[in-house]
């Protein structure tokens, strides 16, 4: 049974009312996205749930395995921008990011590698990343909001 990806539009809300429109493809298992936990705290205060929202710092770059673009080139850095993303895990348009974060602890740092063809061209343009590039997003989970918490 083959994968028939369809493009979905999503929104990641940033602090200071800044919105970055993203487009993602719906993924089948084995579509090439990988996750690596870089660091995780010893005692876990909270875990990301399927209906949580999370505040994350994101550092994105062109992955060292990319066949396109300057390897290691920064494409997004919310720490340097003094902002963070708030991701709504249950938002179906952010399925692949949410799936990678569910079950992780607050203060965990994880890297998600996204192969070519997953991010929509508009997102690549916003990131100043070339079409066909493999991207790596290092995410630090700053805060986990339960569904009833105010954002």
Image: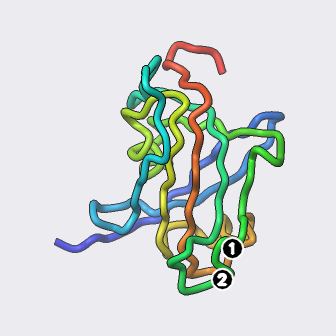
Identify which residue is drawn at 42% across, 66% down: 6
Where 141 sits versus 67, above or below? above
Disc count in the image? 2
Where 10 sits versus 151, above or below? below
| Quarter of the picture holding the N terminus | bottom left
Image quarter of residue 44: top left
Q: Secondary structure at mark 1?
A: loop
Identify which residue is drawn at 71% across, 64% down: 75
Q: Secondary structure at mark 2?
A: loop
Q: Which residue is mark 2?
A: 69
| First reached walking from the N terminus: tag 2 or tag 1 | 2
* Most distant residue in the bottom direction: 67
Residues marked 2 and 1 touching at CB (< 8 Å): yes
Q: Which residue is mark 1?
A: 129
Where 19 sits versus 27, above or below? above
Return the mark for residue 96.
none
Instruction: Give the percent coordinates (x, y) of residue 108.
Output: 51, 36
Instruction: Give the percent coordinates (x, y) of residue 142.
Output: 61, 30
Q: Nearer the viewer, mark 2 or mark 1?
A: 2
| Quarter of the picture holding the C terminus | top right
**Residue 118 as seen in the image, left or right of residue 14:** left
Q: Foreground residue, 66 or 122?
A: 66
**Residue 16 as seen in the image, left or right of residue 46:** right
Identify which residue is drawn at 65% across, 48% down: 58
Structural distance between the alpha carbons of marks 2 and 1: 7 Å
Q: Foreground residue, 64 or 135?
A: 64
Identify which residue is drawn at 74% across, 64% down: 126
Q: Residues within 10 Å of mark 1 (few under 14, many from 20)?
A: many
* Most distant residue in the front direction: 42
Instruction: Give the percent coordinates (x, y) of residue 63.
Output: 56, 71
């Amino acid at each position: 049974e083959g994968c028939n990806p369809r493009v979905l539009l999503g929104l990641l809300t940033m602090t200071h009312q800044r919105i970055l429109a993203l487009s993602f493809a719906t993924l089948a298992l084995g579509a090439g996205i990988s996750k690596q936990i870089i660091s995780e705290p010893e005692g876990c205060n909270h875990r990301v749930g399927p209906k949580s929202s999370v505040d994350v710092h994101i550092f994105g770059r062109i992955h060292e395995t990319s066949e396109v673009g300057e390897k290691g080139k920064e494409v997004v850095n919310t720490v340097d921008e003094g902002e963070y993303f708030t991701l709504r895990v249950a938002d179906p348009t952010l399925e692949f990011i949410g799936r990678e974060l569910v079950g992780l602890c607050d203060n965990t740092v994880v890297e998600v590698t996204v192969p070519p063809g997953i991010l929509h061209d508009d997102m690549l343009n916003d990131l100043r990343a070339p079409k066909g590039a493999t991207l790596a997003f290092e995410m630090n989970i700053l805060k986990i909001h339960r569904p009833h918490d105010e954002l």
